[in-house]
């Protein structure tokens, strides 16, 4: 399972674009990169998933360079309600049945 | 949008008592999971369940824990004899596919053991 490293915390203001970068140097060929969001006292919520290049949905964009050793979650024009913990997950566990969460990045958005 | 539901939202129990946490996964999902999160710590995998049997369990999921799908809609986690260190948020999740990248989590049950 690939080890991931992401910043412990980030601060932003409303309306700004936020980019959270995750490094995963030992990503395996068949690993996908997945990002989850967790609000306080709630369960994690799937945001986006990608394998390479760029993926965009209504919530965020995910940029993955050709070497796939890192990925960047981009949140356009954040609002106060985007304050949450963001987790970068690479692959699943060996049996393929579990998500392995790290400590994530706590994003604080202020006005 | 379909969602995973969990009951109760908060359960307080005394050490040594049995608790059952209940979950209703999304109806067309086939894979079910329990995770827990101790306050201020990471979300930790407990167990995965498919086709009425455990697919995988973590080291946390010892003999005090059991899971069951008693009917076509509910998925339960039982802790036989609770300990203080079992106090945590317990999240149920479900997924449509075996490759478990996109899981849908419930709102959680906060278990407090006194």
Image: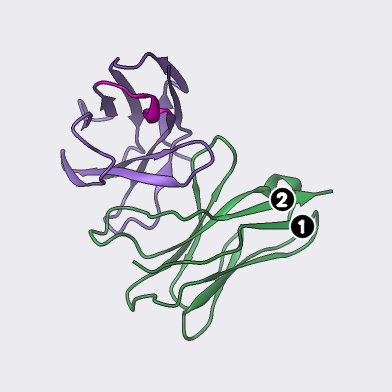
Q: Which residue is mark 1?
A: A12
Q: Which chain is purple?
A: B
Q: Quadrant of residue B77?
A: top left
Q: Which residues are magenta?
A: B81-87
Instruction: Please tell me if label 2 and label 1 are on a single chain.
Output: yes
Tag 2 residue: A108
Residue B72 visible: yes
Color of chain A here? green
Rounded to the nearest whole Å, what is the CA distance between mark 2 and mark 1? 6 Å
Please state which of residues B9 and B43 is positioned toward the viewer in this rendering: B43
Q: Position of residue A97 (x, y in %)?
A: 27, 54
Q: Is residue A93 shown left or right of residue A27?
A: left
What chain does badge 1 belong to? A
Q: Nearer the viewer, residue A57 or A98?
A: A98
Residue under the image location 47 percent in, 47 percent down: B42
Establish if A42 lies above or below B21.
below
- Whether the magenta-drawn stretch holds residue B104 is answered as no
Q: Which mark is residue A22?
A: none
Tag 2 secondary structure: strand
Q: Residues within 10 Å of mark 1 (few under 14, many from 20)?
A: some
Q: Is residue B3 left or right of residue A61?
A: left
**CB-based contact (under 8 Å), mark 2 and mark 1:** yes
Q: Quadrant of the C terminus of chain B?
A: top left
Q: Is residue B41 above or below residue A29?
A: above
At 35% across and 30% down in the image, what residue appears? B24
């Amino acid at each position: 399972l690939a080890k991931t490293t992401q910043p412990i915390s980030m601060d932003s203001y409303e309306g700004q674009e936020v980019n959270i970068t995750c490094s995963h140097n030992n990503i395996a060929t068949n690993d996908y990169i997945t990002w989850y969001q967790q609000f306080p006292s709630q369960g994690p919520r799937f945001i986006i998933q990608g394998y390479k290049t760029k993926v965009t949905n209504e919530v965020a964009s995910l940029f993955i360079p050709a070497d796939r050793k890192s990925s960047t979650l981009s949140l356009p024009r954040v609002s106060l309600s985007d304050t949450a913990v963001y987790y970068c997950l690479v692959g699943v566990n060996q049996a393929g049945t579990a998500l392995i969460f790290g400590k994530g990045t706590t994003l604080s958005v202020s006005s | 949008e379909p969602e995973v539901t969990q009951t109760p939202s908060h359960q307080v129990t005394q050490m040594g008592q049995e608790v059952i946490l209940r979950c209703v996964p999304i109806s067309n999902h086939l894979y079910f999971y329990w995770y827990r999160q101790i306050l201020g710590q990471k979300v930790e995998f407990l167990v995965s369940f498919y086709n009425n049997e455990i697919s995988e369990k973590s080291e946390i999921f010892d003999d005090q824990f059991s899971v069951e799908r008693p009917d076509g809609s509910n998925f339960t986690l039982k802790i036989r004899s609770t300990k203080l260190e079992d106090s945590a948020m317990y999240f149920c999740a479900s997924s449509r596919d075996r490759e478990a990248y996109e899981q849908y989590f419930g709102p959680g049950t906060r278990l407090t053991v006194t």
